[in-house]
Amino acid sequence: MTIGAGASYAPAYFGSDDYELSPSGTFRFDYVRFPNGFTFGSGNTVGFVEGFGLRGSANYIGKRDSSEHDEINGLDDVNRTLELGLGLGYEQANYRVFANARYGFFGHKSFVGDAGADLIARPIQGLTLTAGPRMNFGSNKFANTYFGINQTESAASGLAEYSADGGLMSAGVEITALYQFNPRWGVRADLTWDRLTNDAKDSPITQQGDDDQFRIKLVLVRRISIDF
């Protein structure tokens, strides 16, 4: 597995134009081999095995504390969310395509997904560069959790009532640089731009902020192997 810890500079909440520096991390279940020879996942540092591969997918969304932001004060808070699921992809030496599906625990309690493609380059030993488009999807419940406004919230915040439908929530581009000092330790930098779309873009919450969402993340990563 691969784990990492570092920091990110990202919007304070979905649709915000205020940015915050906060702790960040990464976790990816890469690969397991059972005694009978059955294998799951990828032993590669980039992602999937060459050809089709299956992997674990995880994501963390921080708490939205509406009282900390005047423009959405009165909306319901949203607890921290841990999303867990699976991903399927196809990878060759210089490109990959993939899709992930996850369920959110503790916070939005709904289904989400993402899909993308990357070009992969290794200009020098130890350095892997990837870049490509991203699409992020959410269910109706996810959309209403972060972009919807019910009658009570409208009265408390002064924002108009709004019911958000799920579907394509955003589309954008992600660029990643991973430098491995050795087979176990490395540093990873991510630069992501997403533009909110459809009901996420039209929400009064986003109208108070910005539909262009940028994120910079820098983490120290460690590959861990466990043998039984």
Image (cartoon, rainbow, N blue to C red):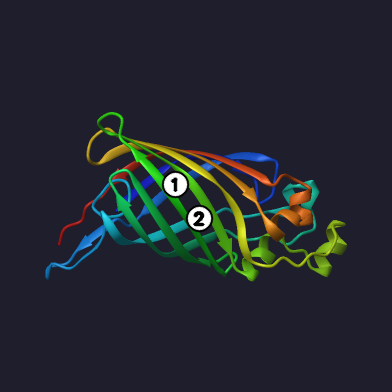
Identity, as a three-letter code, of the amino acid under mark 1:
Gly
Q: Residue 85: where, in percent of width, then height?
A: 43, 65
Identify the residue shown where x is 69% and y is 50%: 15
- Quarter where residue 158 is shown: bottom right
Q: Residue 35: where, in percent of width, then height?
A: 12, 68
Compared to 59, does 215 lie above or below? above
Q: Secondary structure at mark 1?
A: strand
Compared to 103, does 67 lie above or below? above
Callout 2 touching callout 1 (CB < 8 Å): yes
The number of numbered discs placed on residues in the rendered structure image is: 2
Viewer-nearest residue: 44 or 32: 44
* Horizontal side of residue 143 vs 115, given as left or right: right
Residue 25's disc is 1
Residue 60's disc is 2
Viewer-nearest residue: 77 or 86: 86
* Horizontal side of residue 150 vs 49, given as left or right: right
Q: Residue 204: where, in percent of width, then height?
A: 79, 55
Disc 2 or 1, which lies upstream in sequence?
A: 1
Identity, as a three-letter code, of the amino acid under mark 2:
Tyr
Q: Residue 74: where, in percent of width, then height?
A: 80, 58
